[in-house]
Structures are given as C-alpha cells and as structure tokens.
Image (cartoon, helix red, strand yellow):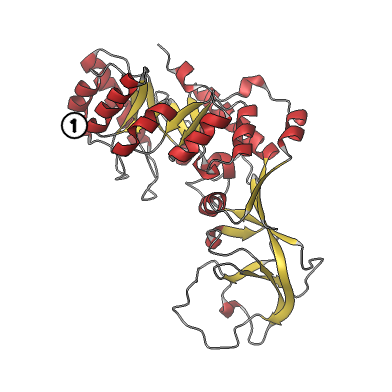
Amino acid sequence: MNRIILNLPALQHNLQTISHWMDLRESAWTVVTKVLCGHEETLRALQILGVRSMGESRLENLEVIRRVVPEIETWFLRVPNLSEVEAVVALSDVSLNSELELIHLLNEEAAKQGKKHGVIIMIELGDLREGILPGTLVQFYKQVFTLPHIDVLGIGANLGCLVGSVPTVDQFMQLVLYRELLELKFERKLRMVSAGASSALPLALDNQLPKAANHFRIGEALFLGTDLIHGGTLPGLRSDTVVLEAEIVEIKRKSLVPLVETSNVAPFQFEGAQNPQELSPGQRGYRALVSVGHLDTDVTGLVPENPHHRIAGASSDIMVVNLGDEPGDYRVGDRLRFRLNYAAMLRLMGGKYVEKAVYPDLDKFRQQLDVDKGTEVAPVLDLVAE
C-alpha cells in the first residue's frame, strides 16, 4: 500500500511557530489549505490546533471546509469566474478581486443572500498575475466603496507566485502608500494590507517588512517548512510534516547502466534521475521498484529519505530506486519513504490512487494535545473589526 502521511505533531510545531511570528508583528494570517485538496482529517486537525481562518482556490474544497469545520472563516483565493458568484458568496467570507463587473455581481448576490461580502482589491506590482494597475486605483475604489453589500477590507497583491520573482521591501512599501492615499482621498479606513505569503516570511523574520503589512496567506511554509527565497527550510520550522511511503514491489541486483540504446525522446525524463554517467560501465547494484509514478505525483519533487538511495527514473506507474551495493533490510512489501516538495504533495493529495492519512489518528492526537491557547491563529475578522 502506498500512502502520504501528514505528521500532526510536526504540523502543530510549524503552526505554533508561524503564529508566534505573526503575533510579534501584530498580524493576522490565513492558512492556505489548497494543497490539502479538501482532506477532511487534516482540516479537522487544523481546527483542533486553533486555526480560525482558511483560504482555498477551489469551491469544491470550500464546500468541504463549510461542512467539516463550519465555524471557520473562509477566503476564496482565486479571482472568481462570473459563473461562480453565487457559490463564492455562499461559501466564503472574503474573496480577492480585480474586476469591477465581478464585484458588482458579488454585491448583488450578497444582497440576495442577506449578507455582506468582504473583498480585498488586488493590485499588480510586477508578478503579472491578477491585479488592477496602480494608475486606476482611485477610480476603481471610488466605485467599489459605494456598494452596500461589499465590505472593502483592504488591498493586497500576489508577489512571487507566478514568475518566481523575489518579493521586495519596496513592493510592500508601495502597498502601504497606496492604502494611505486611498484613506486620505476617501476619508475611510482600509483595515488590511494582505500581501504576505510563504515567500515573504524571510523578509518578515529579518524585520524588513513595514508593520502596516498586517495579513499573510501562508500554505507551503506551514506544510513543508520551505524557505522559498534561500532554499532549504526556514529557521525554526520542520520539514518532516509530510512523507510519502511507497511499497516495494520488486527488489533485485541488476545493472545500474542501461544495456540497450537509449532515446532522447523517452516519454518520462527528469533532471533529478540518477545520471548513468555517474556510474561505471557494467556497474551493478540493488534496484527497488515501487508502484508510484508520474500518474500519481510530480516525481521530480520526491527526495528519498535515505541519503544513500537515488531515484533512477520513473514511468507512469512505476519508479525505480537505486539502493546501493546491498539491499539492507529491505524486502518486497516494505516501504521506502520520500520527502516531498509542494508540487509533489499537491499532485498526491489531489490524486485518487494514493491513500492519505494523518499520524497519529485524530482521536489519539486529541488525547495527546496540549495546545497553548496563546498560539491560536489570529482570526482575521476580529483583527479588522472597526
């Protein structure tokens, strides 16, 4: 059996550490749960750990959140389709927006549902994803502020999400200045600057971000501990929150170098595979086959937990791992363990072929848990309440 396991004590550690960082900044943050793909046990675990704000980009996953943890504050983190307006208002408290027509429709739908819908207006600051151009800012807000069922919470941006650009202090300062401009122009307070993401945490830890940047949307750093600027793991976070266990279906001593002519147009090639040029002609060793392949995950995002193991390659449903000169204690039916990057985790959680599990199970976790109430994730709507 193959399975992806979420280590709840490690997740608890990362959650409390990031919450502490946010407390020091007097900032709120929303846990971005996109990578969980609606996994109910992990959502319940996050609630047990004190999470009170979750962000999603799929309405199907928001439906799961509303059903499993209905009291959680929800954010819709993708600019909505026109056809999704009714569901966005019904399932989310806050959405990110950059189109006037869409905000007008959200206002009309919120009126029908008898509620106010919170919006963050996204501004384009160089990543070339969603966002209005700064030169249209005043005119845009002039129209949005008049909508009775829209609560304009503030401004935001996506930085480093599309082209891999490194967020800068100047970009955050621009957002803060834009907020000040709008507040002076309309004599109305904008309570939130939402631009922080996992990629902004190194700047936050170095105390380089303006304090007015007071809302973060964080997923990858929580679930994997990733430092998206310098590589590796952010100081104080754990990288063992998620692991893939893949069952060995064959283990044999074989040649480690292909014995036949190879092609440059093979269906599956990736740079992470062990290069045959690193091996001696005729070199032999033990090779293990596991029943996980490109159909299940982004194989390039897998790293064997055992540093002596190397991935030799993979097809759609089989991966070959070089174990070395000796097989060790491994036998058919045993499992090899792999660490994951974000893309590999996302594919595994969204796929249907690999089991998803939490460790320990939720009942045992509840019994073991002794959560410090001071480390609860700051609830956004409490932070921004007038």
Residue farthest right in this picture:
329
Q: Position of residue 342 (x, y in %)?
A: 52, 50
User: In the rendered view, would you say 304 is above or below 52?
Assistant: below
- Left or right: 335 in relation to 137: right
User: In the rendered view, would you say 266 is above or below 209?
Assistant: below
Residue farthest front in this picture:
112
Question: Callout 1: few (<14), some (14-19), or many (20+) C-alpha neighbours within 10 Å?
Answer: few
Q: Secondary structure at mark 1?
A: helix
Residue at screen point 77% across, 30% down: 368
Q: Position of residue 383 (x, y in %)?
A: 46, 18
Residue nearest the observer in this picture, 225 or 335: 335
Q: Which residue is mark 1?
A: 136
- Left or right: 306 in relation to 128: right
User: In the rendered view, would you say 223 is above or below 174?
Assistant: below
Rendered-image quadrant of the N terminus: bottom right
Rendered-image quadrant of the C terminus: top left
Residue type at tag 1: Thr
Residue at screen point 64% across, 68% down: 310
Q: Position of residue 143 (x, y in %)?
A: 20, 23
Report whether residue 357 is seen.
yes
Q: In which quadrant of the rendered view does residue 177 lie?
A: top left
Residue at screen point 52% across, 44% down: 35
Q: How many marks?
A: 1
Q: Position of residue 308 (x, y in %)?
A: 70, 65
